[in-house]
Amino acid sequence: MQTVSLIRSCILIRKNSNKSFGRRRKEVPYGIQVRLPCDALNYKFRKSMHRSRLFAALDTNDNHPPILVPEDNANNVPEQEQVSILSGWSPPRPLWRGLSVLILAGQVIIRLLKGKIHRKNTLQQLERVGPKSVGVCLLTSAFVGMAFTIQFVREFTRLGLNRSVGGVLALAFARELSPVITSIVVAGRIGSAFAAELGTMQVSEQTDTLRVLGSDPVDYLVTPRVIACCVALPILTLICFTVGMASSALLADAVYGVSINIILDSAQRALRPWDIISAMIKSQVFGGVISIVSCAWGVTTLGGAKGVGESTTSAVVISLVGIFIADFFLSCCFFQGAGDSLKSCMS
């Protein structure tokens, strides 16, 4: 009696016998391993052949079954497995997270052009980014303005350039300090909250629940946050600019004896409308960077509570780096060439 069985990755052919047997091994060409006991014959193939036809028959001369090569390999040539080079490769996580930022930004722009805006959620996020962040932004800008005044007003008064103090302070606050400081505060307070919220929703499968209910997570979660940041940050920047200038003027008048009227007059002559416009444009760009990066890091969170913490920290760090990089390129675009703003305030 002979039995032929197919077991996953090998074909086993055995001749049944109740006699005891020893073990002998013999290597057969073309990758076939054969074990020949006395009365039991085990044929094991190293390569999976569960989809090929194999023929085995007993030889009446020596009572050993010859092996016939499968039909698809009639020329007795060993087959080589075709393995793709990129079959086991997966892109690094920072790479596909960076791509997710671009994809998410494109989806938000398309939805804004189509007018798909969730108004109620947008108003809630505006309240959160705007009025609830005013206190921290004002406190930060006031102390930064006073520290900046201590560093510069003392040196300018010793040089006898009291009339240029206000112009220097106004240009510094309008072009760099107010947009950057406001964006840093918002990135630490709001960006981390966005990443933590969306990351928690992602790991708890709440975003999948939104899809099941027929709501697009980008429309409901991401677009309102991007709109809120891009609208609220320019307003916060203007408020911070005003508070920073006021604190600087009060400190200069109280400590260094430079009159507030001199500082305000110098600032008025040094500032141009384009300085305020450029600050608002910078703030909008920074708001877009903060919201897009934070939301993208949130929706790509993996690994439970630990992953949420890592995504939150990473979102804030990447947002800050993005703010500084964007500030450099925007400054190169907006303020090329030699300026004459300080000349008018010194006359």
Image (cartoon, rainbow, N blue to C red):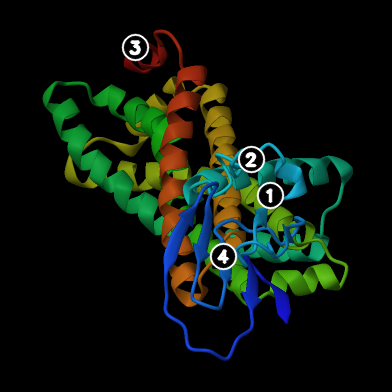
Instruction: Determine which residue is flagged by label 3.
Output: 347
Instruction: Determine which residue is flagged by label 4.
Output: 44
The residue lying toward the viewer, choosing from 206 and 167, is 206
Structural distance between the alpha carbons of marks 1 and 2 = 7 Å
Can residue 210 be seen? yes
Q: Mark 2 and mark 1 in contact (Cβ < 8 Å)?
A: yes
Q: Mark 2 and mark 3 in contact (Cβ < 8 Å)?
A: no
- x, y percentage for residue 130? 59, 58
Which kind of residue does numbered mark 4 sit on? Lys
Sequence-first disc among 3 and 2? 2
> Pointer 2: residues within 10 angstroms few (<14), some, or many (20+)?
few
* Mark nearer the viewer, 3 or 2: 2
Q: Outermost residue toward the front?
A: 61
Which kind of residue does numbered mark 2 sit on? Asn
At 58% across and 29% down in the image, what residue appears? Answer: 277
Sequence-first disc among 2 and 4? 4
Against 141, residue 176 (above or below) is above
The residue lying toward the viewer, choosing from 89 and 317, is 89
Structural distance between the alpha carbons of marks 3 and 2 = 97 Å
- x, y percentage for residue 232? 62, 51
Instruction: Determine which residue is flagged by label 2.
Output: 76
Sequence-first disc among 4 and 3? 4
